[in-house]
Image: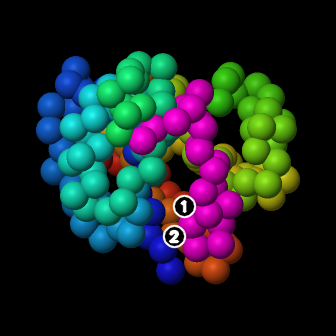
Amino acid sequence: MLHVAVVSDTHAPRFWKRLPSAVAEQLASVDVILHAGDVCVPSVLDELAAFAPVHVVLGNNDGPDVAAWGASETLHIELDGVQVAMIHDSGQKQGRARRMRACFPDADLVVFGHSHIPWDTEEGGQRLFNPGSPTDKRRQPRGTMGRLVLDDGRIVSASIVPVT
């Protein structure tokens, strides 16, 4: 089984001054970390990488220094047999499932961010997952991140975890 932490929209240094302790607690037992963009400064990725390997995509607030760390516009990876695609902005919620299927036809799981709104749905065999933001909750009641458990090509569990 592969334990995955999912974060997005950390917006450092404006909202992420340093790794929040509740996020660190969630990272202590993971095998890999996915960051769905709007990192803003690569030092956040260095903090996360102290816990587990990090895969990251560029957000609309990320610059060349985050790209130099290894972020790309989109990402396709396989994690324990699960085909994972990542993008920062999946567009408006109306038509999202259709758009993501068209963009990532072979993905079992699409991880995205941008809205700061946690989202976990499955449509047509493709799971769409936005962890929200651990540091900039906007109109959400709490800051959040995500946890996934993957095993042999299956998404065993997916959860949105409150961290504030």
| Principal secondary structure, stretch drawn in magenta | strand
Marks 2 & 1, CB-CB < 8 Å contact: yes
Kindly give the residue lying farthest to the front in the view shown: 68
Residue 138 quadrant: top left
- Indicate left or right for 44 with 54 as reference: left
The answer to which of 92 and 43 lies nearer the viewer is 43
Return the mark for residue 108: none
Q: Is residue 78 visible?
A: yes
Residue 89 quadrant: top right
Query: Of the residues shown, which amino acid type is indicated by label 1?
Result: Ala
Task: Decide: is 96 above or below 151.
Answer: above
The residue located at (68%, 22%) in the rendering is: 92
Q: Position of residue 15 (x, y in %)?
A: 23, 26
Q: Position of residue 76 (x, y in %)?
A: 63, 50
| Lower position in the chain sequence, tag 2 or tag 1 | 2
Query: Of the residues shown, which amino acid type is indicated by label 2?
Result: Val
The answer to which of 76 and 36 lies nearer the viewer is 76
Q: Position of residue 48 (x, y in %)?
A: 27, 51
CA separation, marks 2 and 1?
7 Å
The residue located at (42%, 32%) in the rendering is: 67
Return the mark for residue 158: 1
The answer to which of 149 and 117 lies nearer the viewer is 149
Return the mark for residue 149: 2
- Residue segment shown in magenta: 70-89
**Secondary structure under badge 2?**
strand
